[in-house]
Amino acid sequence: MFFHIKELQYNAKPDRPDPVYAKKLQEILGGQFGEITVFMQYLFQGWNFRGEQKYKDMLLDIGTEEIAHVEMIATMIAQLLDGAPAKEQDEAAKDPVIEAVLGGINPQHIIVSGLGATPTDSVGYPWNSRYTIASGNLLADFRANLNAESQGRLQVVRLYESTNDPGVRDMLSFLIARDTMHQNQWMAAIEEIEQNQKPIVPSSFPQELEKQEVSYSFMNFSQGEESAQGRWASGQTIDKQSNFDYIANPEAMGQVPKLNQAPAYIHNTPIPGQPAPNIDVASYMQDKKQE
């Protein structure tokens, strides 16, 4: 159950309208790494979790907070759209300079939402649930969460740099600070989990069943060997199970693939040197009737 209070988590009030910036702000609302994504991702991870209660509670804590961020950004977008009806835009756009500026406005903010935010990104692409990850494996999920907060904070910082509006910057500075906490939170949770299990996901799979000859080999598949200088190319592996091995010129280990010709009813291009498969027309027609 969710309970809504009227006050926002933090202020979301611009100093002046800016319809063009409202379009940019849609990215951190309905984009791949926006607030809708993280609130859905964290809540589904929490609802689906079948383990220690502290992790479930933490996921529901942060997932619910992200709903508050959705409300803040949606409120900010609506206020940035104040005073921007289509008629005034059309009149102002008679000036070529103003027309160039107004060209960045999202027309759906007028036509579809009536000067309100929409669950879309900054180019109007609808938010979709495929952005979210909830696998049931906490280590895999928490690493995905860390990536989401990293990308999200990066985008908010870029938006902060692209406006001089003190009110907008004030709200964004709050979101940036919360993303700082959330990155630290996921890193702390990842560190805690890795103290109790191997860092490779899933840790429960018997490693002897994998092709261990290549488990820790870095293979140079591009021109140059600068990659040999990295931490991933020598020394003890992160899971402390072996040492990294650098292979400068990896050799192919598989067969040359050779596929059989497809049945005649598929009508592929015949393979030179191979006899075309025969087809029993009567049997083929009977099969088609049964279908």
Image: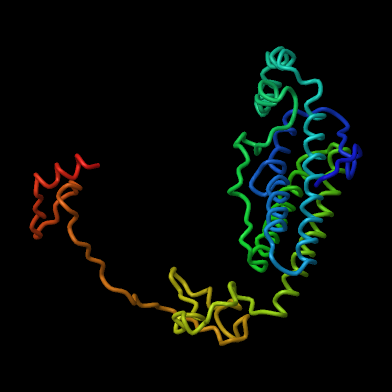
Observer-nearest residue: 206 or 103? 206
Give the residue displayed 76% in from the left and 49% down from the top: 157
State whether residue 179 is above or below residue 117. Answer: below
Observer-nearest residue: 124 or 135? 135
Give the residue displayed 72% in from the left and 30% down from the top: 20
Residue 45 in the image: state x and y as whole percent: 69, 58
Q: Quadrant of residue 186?
A: bottom right
Residue 236 in the image: state x and y as whole percent: 60, 86
State whether residue 94 is above or below residue 196. Answer: above
Q: Quadrant of residue 257?
A: bottom left
Quadrant in which the C terminus is drawn: top left
Numbered-mark total: 0
Observer-nearest residue: 228 or 138? 138
> In the orientation shown, which residue stands out farthest toward the front?
290
Query: Does 219 sit left or right of 195 as displayed?
Result: left
How was the colour assigned to the protein in this rendering? rainbow
Residue 104 in the image: state x and y as whole percent: 66, 29
Give the residue displayed 67% in from the left and 49% down from the top: 33
Residue 98 in the image: state x and y as whole percent: 71, 21
Give the residue displayed 72% in from the left and 44% down from the top: 28
State whether residue 1 is above or below residue 24. Answer: below
